[in-house]
Amino acid sequence: MVTPAENKLFIQALDGRTHKIPPLWMMRQAGRYLPEYREIRASVPTFLEFCYSPKLATEATLQPIRRFGFDAAILFSDILVVPDALGQKVSFEQGEGPRLPPIVDAAGLLALRSRIDLEKLNPVFETIELIKASLSKETALIGFCGAPWTVASYMIAGRGTPDQKPARLFAYENPDLFQILIDLLVEASIDYLERQFIAGVETVQIFDSWAGVLPLTEFERWCLKPILRIVEGLKVRVPHARIIAFPRGVGSHLEAFAGHPGINALGLDTSADPIWVSRNIQSRKPVQGNLDPFALIAGGRALDESIDRIKQAFAGKPYIFNLGHGILPETPIAHVEQLVARVKSA
Ligand code: CP3
């Protein structure tokens, strides 16, 4: 029997169906480039209060769908609600990004909860239910979490860093302690994603934004294995779970994910070569990406040509059109309209 999810273009592509015109959404499609987002964001003092307000988070999720008719909505939240629900207090400084009390030693690790507090994340699950009640039958709903390595990099540094130096050093100097943190995040992510599915998401994306900085051995230990453990653990609890992995910046290591049966699609960053990907990855898994967010800021011919190159390389096999990383706040709305028209034209 055909279930409603399987009538959605985006879900069909994840399941391996090829479309002449691909489904489309954009990473960070809700957010500061939209005046209607800036307006509702100004109604609460802090970003986390915004994330934990089901009405506001639902509205932020729906805004880009109303404006652009994307094929998928993504839950409005942040990857750092997980440390927050593990007992590490998270805040977002205006214009400066996230701040957490850095974890520098075993005592910092011991201060965390031993399991994620899902009660604290009830507003997120309530948001998913509200979104589901308002989405049209064509639009899929994506949940997400950060991958353990990326989330740990913020937990150790206490903030965003250009090179993830604190976490990289911590992992070399205290591998056993770092393993404990990664294991905790693997379990927390499985619990959290399971509840997102129960609340109504149809797929989840695992964001490993900083996967690309590690050498092979460390990549395998801190990125690949933990993500595969999440995939396997989630599939046991939610056998129908569809999962997109987005290990940003890993180049040819994408092949290590492409072979895993539990992963439905692979997110591609801006640097992935569409021709290489179509030969080596897309032959095994649907892919998603990978327009440069700066081409979207530039607009004009550069944007059209970038879109056409991606469409040509991925045509004839299943793919989802997206950016290679999140849309930037200074992006003109007219350029997003140009993107939608061009991707959706034959
Ligand atoms: O539209 C969507 O994609 C859904 C919402 C979403 C946000 N963050 C909202 C947000 C998603 C999926 C994320 C993921 C996220 N958050 C990642 C992984 C993806 C990536 O971009 O690499 C990471 C590393 C974070 C951590 C984070 N959150 C940082 C470093 C920052 C500050 C930098 C910034 O862009 O401002 C945030 C804040 C944040 N998360 C904002 C939004 C809309 C901006 C805060 C605001 O609006 O006041």
Image (spheres, grey):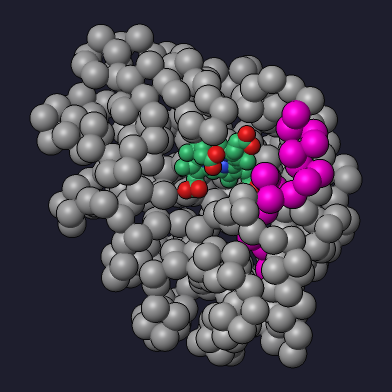
- In the displayed structure, does residue 39 sit left or right of residue 143? right
Q: Residue at x 47, y 56 (%)?
A: 245
Quarter where residue 18 is shown: bottom right
Identify which residue is drawn at 13% across, 35% down: 172
The N terminus appears in which quarter of the rendering? bottom right
Report the side of 268 relative to 133 (left or right).
left
The tally of labels here is: 0
| Residue 38 placement: quadrant | top right
Quarter assignment of residue 230: top left
**Is residue 246 visible in this depiction of the protein?**
yes
In depth, the one of 323 and 333 nearer the eye is: 333
| Residue depicted at x 69% and y 61% | 332
Q: Is residue 240 magenta?
A: no
Whether residue 29 appears in magenta in the rendering, the answer is yes
Quadrant of the image for the C terminus?
bottom right
Ligand 1: image quarter:
top right
The residue positioned farthest toward the left in the image shown: 173
Percent across and percent down for residue 260 are 39, 62
Residue 108 percent location from the top left of the image: 29, 13
Left/right of residue 36 with respect to residue 314 in the rendered view: right
- Principal secondary structure, stretch drawn in magenta: loop
At which x and y percent is residue 107? 25, 9
Stretch of the chain drawn in magenta: 23-42
